[in-house]
Amino acid sequence: MNTSSTLLPAVVHPAVEVRPWLSSDHCASLVLELLGGLGWTIIDTPESNVHCTSPDGRVYVGWLPEDTTAWKRGIVWQVRVRPSDAEPWVQEFGPDTPSEAVAGFLAALIASR
């Protein structure tokens, strides 16, 4: 079947945008601002690691840029969840994960609780 080119839909090319959030900024401030604004306990260590606990104590978030054990495993973020009606679980994020992605994950987790 031959189709006239005038009957075919136009090819649309998406605009190329600069998306700096697609690469890691190696900064925890976005996540810490989110959790602090929600009343989480936030503790800084002298080693520059940060530990956050939800008000009910069921969720822990660690920013571990100076934790050698975490670095050996390829992570800088650790999220540990202890649900009241299910098995505990852990989610970890590597050093190249943008803080926006970690904040989005946490926002979705918190919203679903």
Image (tube, helix red, strand yellow):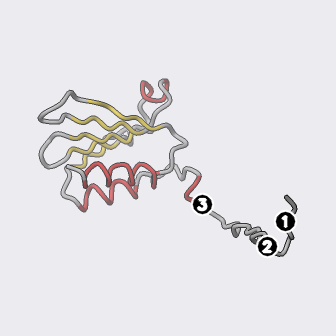
Q: Is residue 48 left or right of residue 3?
A: left
Q: Which numbered circle lies on residue 20?
A: 3
- Gap in Å between the C-alphas at discs 1 and 3? 42 Å
Q: Is residue 49 left or right of residue 16?
A: left
The residue that appears at 69% across and 67% down in the rendered structure is 14
The residue that appears at 19% across and 47% down in the rendered structure is 54
Residue to which mark 2 is pinned: 7
Foreground mark, 1 or 3, reads 1
Which residue type does callout 3 highlight?
A: Pro
SS assignment at label 1: loop
Residue to which mark 1 is pinned: 3
Between disc 2 and disc 3, whose residue precedes? 2
Pointer 2 local density, CA inside 10 Å: few below 14, some 14–19, many at least 20: few
- Residue 111 point in image, percent of width and height: 25, 55
Foreground mark, 2 or 3, reads 2
SS assignment at label 2: loop
Residue 4 vertical placement versus 84 (above, below): below
Which residue type does callout 1 highlight?
A: Thr
Which residue type does callout 2 highlight?
A: Leu
Between disc 1 and disc 3, whose residue precedes? 1
